[in-house]
Image: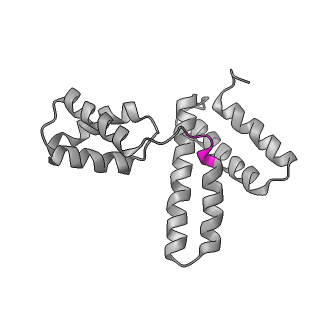
Amino acid sequence: MTDTTLKARLQHDLHDAMRARDKVRSGTLRMVLTSITNAEVAGDEARELGDDEVLKVVAKEAKKRKEASTAFRDANRPELADTEDAELAVLEGYLPAQLGDDELRAIVERAVAATGATGMPQMGLVMKAAQVEVAGRADGGRVAAVVRRVLAG
């Protein structure tokens, strides 16, 4: 199973979750596979997504779960937040390990040096360069915050 795509792994894991009658896991995997299918048929013609693109869809769905969990906790609905957290835990199993603060700062500093950025007007250039190396291992908001701190001083 070392040669399979991430989408195939998701489908295989969905079948296993259905056999095990794991409702949270099977529901979450169905949802993410639906999002992948929607991404494949979006645009002018249908196409198969590569692993990098599938990973972006999984990361996007994980971000939705994080935001929903926070919103439910703020609205004093812990039971709904717990459901979102359970789904997030399933999705995080398919995402690469997240970068620590020191690693992220080092990547951003390399991006600043590579682009020759001197201030906030070049933030877009630095973000673009940093995102290539970060590749889904940190949330865009975290990357932007570190870029702002590095460019500010």
Q: Along the horizontal axis of the image, is 63 left or right of 48?
A: left
Query: Residue 87, percent across and down?
Result: 64, 55
Residue 131 on the magenta span:
no
Q: Along the horizontal axis of the image, is 68 left or right of 116?
A: right
Applied colour scheme: one colour
Task: Tell me the chief SS of the magenta region.
Answer: loop
Residue 20 versus residue 13 in the image, above or below: below
Query: Residue 1, percent across and down?
Result: 74, 24
Q: Residue at x 55, y 42 (%)?
A: 57
Residue bounds of the magenta highlight: 91-95
Q: Residue at x 29, y 37 (%)?
A: 108
Residue 93 on the magenta span:
yes
Residue farthest along the front direction in this orientation: 102
Query: Residue 96, percent across and down?
Result: 53, 37
Callout count: 0
Residue farthest along the top direction in this orientation: 3
Residue 18 versus residue 83 in the image, above or below: above
Residue 60 versus residue 10 in the image, above or below: below
Residue 95 location, quadrant? top right
Residue farthest along the left direction in this orientation: 118
Query: Residue 148, percent across and down?
Result: 23, 48
Residue farthest along the bottom direction in this orientation: 76
Q: Residue at x 55, y 79 (%)?
A: 76
